[in-house]
Image (cartoon, rainbow, N blue to C red):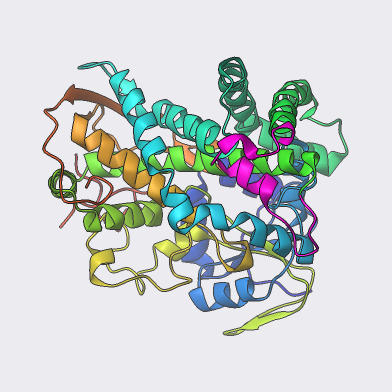
Amino acid sequence: MSYPPGPTEAPAVQTARWIARPIAFLEDCRRRFGPNFSVRFIGFTTPTVMLSDPQAIRELYRGNHDLPPGRTFALRPIMGARSILLLEGEEHLARRKLMLPPFHGERMRAYEDTVREVAQDEIERWPLEQTFPLHPSMQAITLEVILRAVFGVTDPHRRARLREMLPRLLNDTASGRLQLRVLVARRLGRSDPLADLRELARAIDDLLFAEIAERRAAADGDGHEDILSQLMAARFEDGSQMADQELRDQLMTLLLAGHETTATALAWTFDLLLRNPAALSRLTAEVDEGGDDYLRAVISESLRLRPVVPLAGRRLVRDLRTDGLELEAGSDVTPAIWLTHTRGDLYPEPYAFRPERFLEQPPTTYGWIPFGGGVRRCLGGAFAELEMRVVLAAILRRRDVQAASRRAERITRRNVTFSPRKGTRVRVRRRAEPAAGPGGVGGAADAAAGPDERRPAERQPVSG
């Protein structure tokens, strides 16, 4: 089988480079081999082909290919075998159809007040004039939103236990060391490195099954409007419902997919805004006036420069041929999202934080892919953007936020995400809340470095 050229170092070396400095690794590969190249990782017997050309990505995502086996190996022990992220073919499509409605339209916007209330409560707990990391606070917000809007847990004792146990599970599964152990165990056939998490996961399952049982017993649904209740009421085309175990698996999937990613995107957005004062000033003024056009553009630009999930791959079920690229069925292929988002032909000044670019011209469908694409595009992408708009507006209305460091954040790995290494450390002051604006969710930048390094020497370094 023929693959595009790529690094010749041993798989262990390539894996180490990818784990330690992924953006530098990707940039080096693009510079040496062009927009499409192959890499070899520990735990995989064949190369992984990385793409950054939108046309090639379009053909990949339109092909309805399978998931790469690595995702199933790493995620199934936590998400469960019936997770929508792990199912293929008709089973996946049937669940996607069932689960999509709560995350769009009026049903989704019904959660706006919940998000705002959770954000306001968290903001009031922030220390004034002291340095603290923003990322954990964003995690607290997104977790509470999931407990209320997705799980719909109303029992105080059950909610308190989940609030305590779920972060432990998320933190344990996010460990970079654990990821490496999973790869090594898969390659060498060693014991399951996720075994220690199973006892905690079982305790969480007990709480979730108790919540589901109570909902089943309340034949009228007890007036719940959360996503769990909607999933329990939904029917497949044959009239059947999701079984309890599958409901549990989808809840854990929504937790893992929607908690860390949105919290991390919010932390990265502030890291970018605080190093681009003109953009921050313009955004704050718009939020005070009740608009949200620039707010939406800020979020789009942040997700472009700081894609939280770097890869969204497939295993080809048929040959892929596009623009001189020929790959046979069975190949593992993924967009390198950062490389796509920093193509100069798509984004002039690709490393600059310029939200106005999204006001001037919308991105191409496969040139902006922070939520993946095709039939596996993230179900909660629209919900995540809504949550980000509400939280950003709530913060800017109530606090003046300042960076606690002159250095842009470098990245660290949390599970499959790229997160700010120091958590986006800030200092805040209380600001007088402006009068409410006329609706909405509340309302030429400096260059920005890549998230794990200063930009290459031929580009200007970050100022400030």
Of residues 365 and 248, the one drawn nearer to the viewer in this rendering: 248
Q: Is residue 452 magenta?
A: no
Which residue is located at x 80 percent, y 55 percent?
Answer: 240
The residue shown at (60%, 30%) is: 170
Residue 251 picture quarter? top right
Residue at 24 percent across and 46 percent down: it is 462
Magenta-colored span? 216-241
Is 23 left, or right, of 97 in this rendering? left
Position of 52 with respect to 221 (left or right) is left
Give the number of callouts.
Answer: 0
Quadrant in which the C terminus appears: top left
Q: Percent x, y for residue 298?
A: 28, 53
From this view, report whether residue 182 is shown above or below residue 158: below
Residue 363: x percent and y percent?
37, 70
Q: Is residue 95 above or below residue 318?
A: above
Q: Nearer the viewer, residue 254 or 171?
A: 254
Q: Quadrant of the N terminus?
A: bottom right
Residue 69 x/y as whole percent: 77, 54
